[in-house]
Image (cartoon, rainbow, N blue to C red):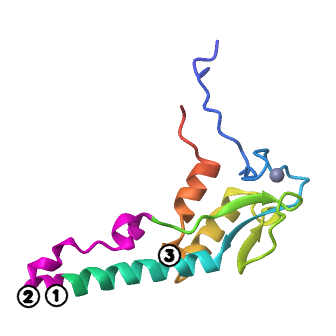
């Protein structure tokens, strides 16, 4: 008997799973991974506003402690935890063609080498930090067991 019977179930090729129907985007199917850049922009603005609020409030608090009760929406929804979300979809499942989408065809993501190239490409974008890119890749391609 081969002692290495506990083989990890790691796929040889990256397979993205459609966030709409939950099925894998097979090699013979059209699909893409995409991000709405308007969402990334919104997150960027939310974080900046929250930062401005914190700074102006801490300035005010130095003079007047009665302002301590000021609560803004940005305190309730911590924008540092907010990200614009990437999604993988079959072309046939993507009914929403609104938005300013930035995308890669899954046909260009058939090997892990290609995923790494795309990864570097995305990481260089100024808006990358406002998206859940690395979490998306991990969830799609390297999900935790159990
Ligand atoms: Zn689908």
Of labels 2 and 3, the one closer to you:
2
Q: Residue at x 59, y 57 (%)?
A: 136
Of labels 3 and 1, the one closer to you:
1
Mark 2, Cα crowd under 10 Å, few <14 / some 14-19 / many 20+, is few
x and y percentages locating residue 113 in the rendered image: 67, 61
- 14 or 2, nearer to the observer: 14
Question: Along the horizontal axis of the image, is 16 left or right of 78?
Answer: right
Image quarter in which the N terminus is found: top right
Q: Cβ–Cβ below 8 Å for labels 2 and 3?
A: no
Q: Which residue is mark 3?
A: 43
Q: Residue at x 38, y 66 (%)?
A: 78
> Distance from label 2 to label 3 (Cα)?
31 Å
> Distance from label 1 to label 2 (Cα)?
7 Å
Q: Which residue is mark 1?
A: 59
Q: Cβ–Cβ below 8 Å for labels 1 and 2?
A: yes
Mark 1, Cα crowd under 10 Å, few <14 / some 14-19 / many 20+, is few
Question: Along the horizontal axis of the image, is 73 left or right of 35?
Answer: left
x and y percentages locating residue 91 in the rendered image: 86, 62
- 48 or 128, nearer to the observer: 48
Q: Residue at x 72, y 53 (%)?
A: 19
The kind of secondary structure the magenta stretch mainly shows is: helix
Q: Is residue 62 magenta?
A: yes
Q: Is residue 135 magenta?
A: no
Q: Is residue 22 above or below residue 91?
A: above
Q: Return the disc, 3 or 1, that comes first in the chain's sequence.
A: 3
Q: Which residue is mark 2?
A: 63
For the magenta stretch, what is the residue range? Answer: 58-81
Q: Classify mark 2: helix, strand or loop.
A: helix
Mark 3, Cα crowd under 10 Å, few <14 / some 14-19 / many 20+, is many
Q: Is residue 33 above or below residue 9?
A: below
- 54 or 9, nearer to the observer: 54
Q: Return the disc, 2 or 3, that comes first in the chain's sequence.
A: 3
């Amino acid at each position: 008997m081969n002692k290495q019977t506990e083989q990890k179930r790691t796929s040889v090729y990256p397979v993205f799973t459609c966030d709409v129907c939950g099925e894998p985007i097979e090699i013979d199917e059209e699909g893409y991974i995409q991000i709405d850049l308007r969402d990334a922009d919104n997150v960027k603005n939310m974080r900046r506003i929250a930062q401005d609020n914190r700074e102006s409030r801490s300035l005010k608090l130095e003079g007047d402690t009665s302002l301590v009760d000021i609560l803004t929406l940005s305190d309730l929804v911590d924008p540092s935890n907010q990200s614009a979300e990437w999604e993988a979809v079959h072309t046939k499942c993507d009914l929403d063609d609104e938005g300013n989408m930035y995308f890669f065809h899954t046909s260009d993501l058939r090997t892990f080498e290609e995923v790494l190239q795309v990864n570097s490409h995305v990481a260089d974008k100024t808006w990358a930090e406002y998206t859940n890119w690395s979490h998306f890749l991990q969830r799609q391609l390297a999900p935790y067991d159990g």
